[in-house]
Amino acid sequence: MSQEKGETADEFGLRMVKTVSSGFVTLAMSMGVRTGLFRHLASMDGPKTSAQIAEMANMKERYVREWLAVMVTGQIIDYDKEKKTYFLPKHRLSALLPDAGMSSIGNMSHLMSQVARVAGDVEDCFLADGPK
């Protein structure tokens, strides 16, 4: 939406917040693929607490809990506030698990983390006296 179509500064600001938030979710998705967290969630027989998921995955609960929070914010994983449990619905698995090939959003999210690793080097190339 452009200014000609009546976009306000607030609308643009909100759109930018959503864009940045989506970037964080994408990076966290990549972590979920690389660490195997999505696989562990796929193998669960029902909702689990962050402590149960961390134990099952042999990971630190604090990091798992923070990652789960990002996944809930991105509406990728469901969260039951009363029971404090997390669950990945089965219909979402094929889009997240790496064996779905390039159609896997999980695999595509990995590209974002790769770009993030070299962003500084690429930024240097923009400079007139930077690397070629």
Image (tube, rainbow, N blue to C red):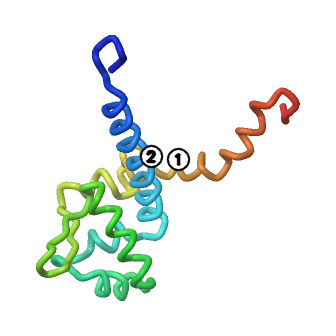
Local crowd at mark 2 within 10 Å, few (<14), some, or many (≥20)? some
Residue at 18 percent of width and 62 percent of height:
89
Residue at 39 percent of width and 76 percent of height:
64
Give residue 22's position: percent from left, percent from top: 38, 47
Local crowd at mark 1 within 10 Å, few (<14), some, or many (≥20)? some
In the picture, the disc for residue 111 is 1
The part of the image, by quadrant, that contains residue 13 is top left
Residue at 45 percent of width and 46 percent of height:
108
Give residue 55's position: percent from left, percent from top: 36, 88
Give residue 33's position: percent from left, percent from top: 43, 62
Residue at 33 percent of width and 69 percent of height:
68
Distance, label 2 to label 1, CA atoms, is 5 Å
Q: Which quadrant of the rendered structure holds the C terminus?
A: top right
**SS label for mark 1:** helix
Give the residue at the far right of this rendering.
129
Residue type, label 2? Met
In terms of depth relative to the viewer, which is nearer, 101 or 30? Answer: 30
Residues marked 2 and 1 touching at CB (< 8 Å): yes
Give residue 126's position: percent from left, percent from top: 75, 31
In the picture, the disc for residue 11 is none
Q: Which quadrant of the rendered structure holds the N terminus?
A: top left
Residue type, label 1? Leu
Q: Which residue in the structure is indicated by mark 2?
A: 108
Lateral position of residue 94 relative to residue 31, left or right = left
Give the residue at the far left of this rendering.
82
Residue 131, relative to residue 119: is it above or below? above
The part of the image, by quadrant, that contains residue 77 is bottom left
Residue 81, relative to residue 92: is it above or below? below
